[in-house]
Image (spheres, grey):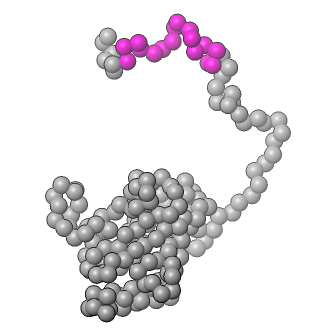
């Protein structure tokens, strides 16, 4: 076992123990395989009053052999839309970027990964990023509890396509007096 492997394994064991003894609210972290400290599974419970309410989102954290000197990779396995999540599930936040000085990135070197970071800080940064984007991230178990009840059944109500549009609007699609500009150049003076 090389020095990087021994130090990364020790760091990961300490972090896993810390996260199990004092978990981050709304997140559950386990090993994918008990024999592999470098591959973690994360369960994230969707916070109430958000698009993610009631959701259960799975993700993986993969650690490099030279952890904590290099950042882990964080990938969602559950498909979702978020501005900081690529289509393949990879999470893009500053804390996961390698510690290089790249003036073109718009990130300060202090915002990027450094060896003092850890999974708890990464998870908290993920929550902070969501809050910055207007997603309410609860901090207590009570805030995560979602009470559900069956919606009232009103047999007289037929929420369907025509509840949003007047029938006349659909019939008038071919009228000459339509409000569309044939030029559609965006220039109002045409």
Task: Find residue 15 and report its horizontal and vertical position in percent.
Answer: 41, 85
Q: Nearer the viewer, residue 37 or 120?
A: 37
Q: Nearer the viewer, residue 188 or 95?
A: 95
Task: Find residue 179 and report its horizontal and vertical position in percent.
Answer: 48, 14
Farthest-out residue, right: 155
Describe residue 70's horizontal placement relative to residue 75 as left or right. left
Q: Quadrant of residue 89?
A: bottom left
Residue 145 seen: yes
Q: Quadrant of residue 187?
A: top left
* Residue drawn at 26 percent across, 79 percent down: 69
Residue 22 seen: no
- Which image quarter holds the N terminus? bottom left
SS assignment for the magenta stretch, majority? loop
- Which image quarter holds the C terminus? top left
Farthest-out residue, front: 1
* Residue drawn at 48 percent across, 87 percent down: 35
Farthest-out residue, top: 176
Task: Find residue 163 and report its horizontal and vertical position in percent.
Answer: 69, 30
Residue 179 part of the magenta segment: yes
* Residue drawn at 53 percent across, 76 percent down: 28
Task: Find residue 149 and report its horizontal and vertical position in percent.
Answer: 74, 58
* Residue drawn at 81 percent across, 46 percent down: 153
Q: Which residues are magenta?
A: 169-184
Residue 158 part of the magenta segment: no
């Amino acid at each position: 076992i090389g020095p990087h492997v021994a130090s990364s394994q020790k760091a990961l064991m300490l972090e896993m123990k810390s996260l199990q003894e004092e978990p981050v609210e709304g997140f559950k972290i386990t090993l994918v395989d008990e024999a592999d400290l470098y591959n973690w599974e994360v369960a994230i419970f969707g916070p109430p009053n958000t698009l993610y309410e009631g959701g259960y989102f799975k993700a993986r954290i993969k650690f490099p052999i030279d952890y904590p000197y290099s950042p882990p990779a964080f990938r969602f396995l559950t498909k979702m839309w978020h501005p900081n999540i690529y289509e393949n599930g990879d999470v893009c936040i500053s804390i996961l970027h390698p510690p290089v000085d790249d003036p073109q990135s718009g990130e300060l070197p202090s915002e990027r990964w450094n060896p003092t970071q850890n999974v708890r800080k990464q998870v908290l940064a993920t929550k902070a990023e969501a809050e910055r984007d207007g997603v309410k991230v609860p901090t207590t178990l009570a805030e995560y509890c979602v009470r559900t009840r069956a919606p009232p059944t009103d047999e007289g109500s037929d929420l369907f396509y025509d509840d949003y549009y007047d029938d006349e609007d659909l019939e008038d699609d071919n009228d000459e007096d339509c409000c569309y500009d044939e030029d559609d150049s965006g220039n109002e003076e045409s």
